[in-house]
Image (cartoon, helix red, strand yellow):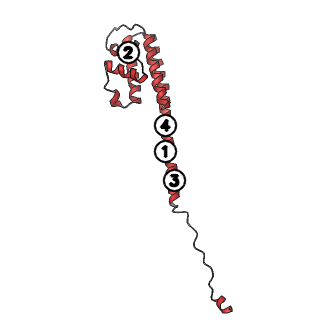
Amino acid sequence: MNNALSQLKDIHLPPAVDWWPPAPGWWLLALLVLAAVALLVWFVRRRIKRVDLYQVSLQELDEIRARYAEDPDAQRLAADLSRLLRRVAITLRPEAEVAGLTGKEWLAWLDAQVDGSEFSDGAGRFLEEGAYRPGGELQDAQALLSVVENWLKKVTREASHA
């Protein structure tokens, strides 16, 4: 019996498991974490852009309002408001949808965004030709500014919550 025990070899342990390459589950987890981080960054940037659009558009409207108070030029007011509305619209919607609209189609599109008719039938009608008609008579500038302000608030708020 002594002879059989002397023929036994010592136990050899396998080498330690390396940390590289990780198991497939770790690769999958890393991909999921990267995708979640990328989605979070996209969402936060989109949210910041929309909030900034709300603040910037209303700030620019205030500047237009102040410029009109100093020099009540209805033609310049209509041109400034039209530019502001167009830039906000192109920021929120595909350019191809918005850029080519003019006249009544443009006013109808503006109305459709807020489910109203203030541009087609109300004070906003002045934007259709006011920027192109020298000495155009604007009946109520405050009503026009109010219509534009309400439109900006509604579409930029909705965009920031989307």
Q: Estimate the spatial distance between the alpha carbons at disc 2 and disc 3, rounded to whole Å.
A: 54 Å
- Residue occupied by mark 4: 45
Left/right placement of residue 159 relative to residue 96 reads right
**Disc number for residue 38:** 1
Query: Splitting the image into 4 quarters, where does residue 12 fall?
Result: bottom right
Residue at the image position 65 percent from the left and 90 percent from the top: 4
Q: Which residue is mark 3?
A: 30
Q: Is residue 45 above or below residue 2?
A: above
Residue at 52% x, 53% y is: 29
Of the two numbered discs 3 and 4 in the rendering, the one whose residue sits closer to the viewer = 3
User: Is residue 32 shown left or right of residue 13?
Assistant: left
Q: Nearer the viewer, residue 114 or 27?
A: 114
Q: Which residue is mark 2?
A: 78
The amino acid beneath tag 2 is: Ala
Q: Residue at x 47, y 23 (%)?
A: 154
Q: Secondary structure at mark 1?
A: helix
x and y percentages locating residue 23 in the rendered image: 52, 61
Instruction: Mark 3 and mark 1 in contact? Answer it, CB < 8 Å.
Output: no
Which comes sooner in the sequence, label 3 or label 4?
A: 3
| Marks 3 and 1, the one that precedes in the sequence | 3
Give the left or right position of residue 146, taking residue 108 as reference.
Answer: right
Please report the residue visible at 68 percent of the width from the left and 92 percent of the height from the top: 1
What amino acid is found at the position of numbered circle 3 in the picture?
Ala
Q: Is residue 19 above or below residue 122?
A: below
Q: Does dot 4 land on a helix, a strand or a loop?
A: helix
Mark 1 Cα-neighbour bin, 10 Å: few <14, some 14–19, many ≥20:
few
**Residue 42 % position (x, y):** 48, 40
Earlier along the polypeptide chain: callout 2 or callout 1?
Answer: 1
Task: Find the distance from the CA under tag 3 to the CA under tag 4.
Answer: 22 Å
